């Protein structure tokens, strides 16, 4: 019988959407996520019981805006974020929603955009757990494309930090990449994608340290990311 989540979990350096994360103390590769808070989601029935937990970034303010050569110059596609029940309705086998905060303002140093953040969490003790965090970047000048450029830059930074582009695509995402996290001894994986002027991060983690099934972790992360993507349509 698998054990439920134990608190507290190890925290890590922060991830800032649209900007490279700060260096770890003593050097080394930059971290993708910050001040992570444990939460979870039973991903898909029939994929196995391997549990995972994820970590949630706090609100933040970055030091300077990034640049991105691959970001499309297009008007904002979205003006609002979905609520967590809408994400959950696109997946089977989810336990009751644990966290359903309304979207809230998120700090950014980019003077061309305003940012809103949404965090969704589901959990069932002893089973699969996970979280989705979305960032909506709205251009202050309508039609400027600043929101999409900012979201695309966050994706570019994730790939530069080791993310592997998903060529088959994820839902309606503009671009998506598999990413790895190492906040604990348990297996972790995730998906980082952007869709128009929305950037999203999905993280899943195996609660059982003996579970090293990366293929299953990837499948679950992809399904959760697809639900997040489709909820914006």
Image (tube, rainbow, N blue to C red):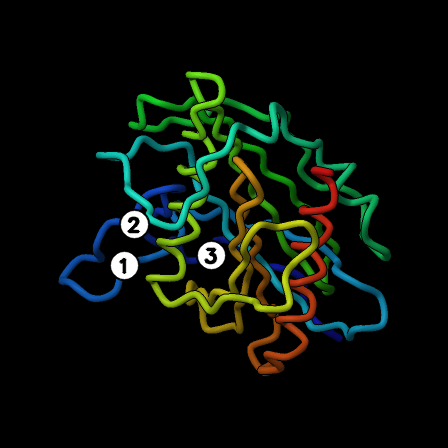
Q: Secondary structure at mark 2?
A: loop
Which residue occupies 72% across, 60% down?
Answer: 223
Mark closer to the observer (1, 3): 1
Q: Nearer the viewer, residue 184 or 69?
A: 69
Q: Which residue is mark 2?
A: 21
In front: label 3 or label 2:
2
Residue occupied by mark 3? 9
Question: If the image is split into quadrants, where does the N terminus sit?
Answer: bottom right
Q: Between marks 1 and 3, how big is the CA–CA gap?
A: 20 Å
According to the image, label 1 marks what residue? Answer: 30
Near mark 2 (Cα within 10 A), the count class, few <14, some 14-19 or many ≥20, is many
Q: Quadrant of residue 96?
A: top right
Residue 50, placed above or below residue 39: below
Q: Secondary structure at mark 1?
A: loop
Image position, residue 10 (x, y; %): 41, 58
Label whose residue precedes the other's in the sequence (1 or 3): 3
Q: Nearer the viewer, residue 176 or 205?
A: 176
Q: Is residue 105 visible?
A: yes
């Amino acid at each position: 019988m698998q054990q439920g989540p134990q608190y507290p979990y190890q925290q890590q350096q922060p991830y800032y959407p649209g900007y490279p994360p700060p260096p770890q103390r003593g050097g080394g590769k930059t971290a993708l996520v910050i001040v992570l808070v444990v939460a979870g989601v039973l991903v898909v029935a029939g994929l196995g019981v391997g549990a995972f937990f994820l970590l949630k970034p706090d609100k933040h303010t970055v030091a300077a805006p990034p640049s991105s050569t691959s970001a499309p110059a297009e008007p904002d596609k979205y003006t609002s974020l979905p609520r967590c029940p809408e994400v959950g309705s696109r997946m089977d086998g989810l336990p009751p929603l644990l966290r359903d905060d309304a979207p809230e303002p998120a700090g950014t140093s980019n003077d061309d955009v305003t940012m809103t953040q949404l965090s969704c969490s589901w959990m069932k003790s002893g089973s699969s757990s996970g979280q989705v965090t979305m960032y909506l970047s709205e251009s202050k000048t309508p039609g400027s494309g600043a929101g999409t450029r900012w979201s695309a830059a966050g994706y570019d930074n994730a790939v530069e930090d080791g993310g592997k582009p998903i060529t088959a695509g994820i839902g309606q995402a503009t671009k998506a990449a598999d990413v790895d996290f190492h906040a604990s001894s348990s297996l972790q994986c995730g998906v980082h994608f952007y869709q128009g002027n929305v950037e999203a991060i999905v993280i899943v983690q195996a609660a059982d340290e003996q579970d090293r099934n990366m293929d299953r972790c990837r499948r679950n992360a992809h399904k959760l990311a697809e639900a997040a993507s489709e909820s914006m349509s």
